[in-house]
Amino acid sequence: MNALSNRSFSLYFFSNTVSLFGLWIQKIGVGWLTWEITESTFWTSFVTLALMAPAGVLGPFFAVFAENWNMRVASVILKILMFLIGILIWFLQYLDQHTLFTLAFLSVLQGLLSACYHPVRLVFVSIVVPKNLLSSAVGLNSASFNGSRVVGPAFAGGLIAFFNLEVTFLIAALTYVPLIPVLIYMPLRTRIKKEVLQGNFFHRFLEGGKFAVRTPIILKGLFVVFVSAFFVRGMLEIQPTIAGEILKQGSFGLSLITTTAGIGALLASIWIGFRNSNKSKIETKLVSMLMLGLIISCIIGFISEVYTMAIFFTVVGFTTTAVGIGTQTIIQLEVEEVYRARVLTWWSSISFGSLTVGGIILGFVGEFTPLSNGLIIMPIIGYFIFKLILYFKFKNNLFN
């Protein structure tokens, strides 16, 4: 039995997937319009990054507040605001009044709302399904995100090519609508009593990190996420540079390797989502997925043919997503609800922050030496760091 057998979750799953499509469509459309206005790679990167970066940077702070929120009310309000910003983006395009400022400003606003919604989304599945379906629900929730990452950009490209940005932005905004009535009317499990969640902001903020540090299985899981994100997944953030410098490809090569990485992520999400594995089975998968990811990442540095590269990027997408979902599921199962949003968002920040810094370092290395050298060296360094910490901190036994 998987979580889709639960009617409430299935309604949430499908409507949330549609809204995630809209977020990715909006991201591609805004990025494309920024490029048309500025022809600047810096500003194009800044505007598109503004839609995603706040979730990683500000997530832990919003998570502290989120624990005292009514999850239903918070979800509905945030989705309505995201819909209204989407409509405003469309309306300004309809009037042909977009500037770099309007695109950057609205992208930052949408990114902040997404950062607020992120801890809510991570915790929400735990109050929709019973505990025996939680592993499946977490996997399917991630499948929803990664599926939208594959289909959304491709759909956005088709809309831009065959219609125009006006139609693209309108469809992106309307995708938020189906989720709103589902959030309003779906039955939810009772959450922990609010009085347990008292305390000042900084105390509660630090308690999330302290809980993770003093809980061995959570600390170990976060360490695995850090190594995977920093030394493996970081390369996914510089795919345009890989396509241009190493593969000598244009938009075709870029679209191929980004799509195949997304397909790998989607397959990992489905694999875990439909298996409904217990904690012990998840633990055994994490290290093997991490090691496979490090090996494949190193091999990618020796590849310069686009179709071979695409195959290996599929494996990278699979392993990094399997690690991410596995650790997220362990947190959902092991952490008391009073700490769950904070710990999950620390997980998210470590993941987003590590892959961002890892990608920046790879790009910096590529300024002084062929990028392929960085792709080879980074996972080797990651392997030795992993083994050293494993030996000295965890006594060569990561999960016990």
Image (cartoon, rainbow, N blue to C red):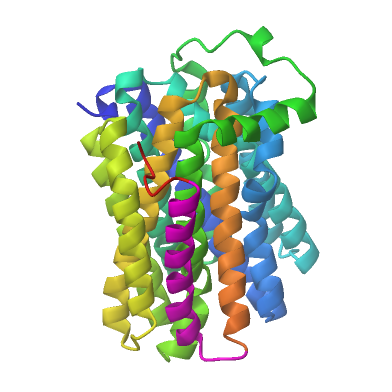
Q: In this view, does 226 lie to the left or right of 195?
A: left
Q: Position of residue 387 (x, y in %)?
A: 42, 59
Vertical order, 33 against 24 (above or below):
below
User: 41 and 169: which one is in front?
Assistant: 41
Q: Where is residue 314 in the image (x, y as percent from the top left)?
A: 30, 66
Range of the magenta residues?
368-393
Name the residue: 34% across, 38% down.
140
Vertical order, 76 against 146 (above or below):
above
Quadrant where the N terminus sits is top left
Query: Which residue, as the protein is rendered here, is positioned at the far left?
Result: 1
Vertical order, 252 against 91 (above or below):
below
Quadrant where the C terminus sits is top left
Name the residue: 78% across, 30% down.
202
User: 95 and 81: which one is in front?
Assistant: 81
Q: In this view, does 41 lie to the left or right of 172?
A: right
Q: Where is residue 234 in the image (x, y as percent from the top left)?
A: 51, 66
Name the residue: 51% across, 54% down.
226
Q: Can residue 118 be seen in this view?
A: no
Tell me if residue 246 is in the magenta stretch: no
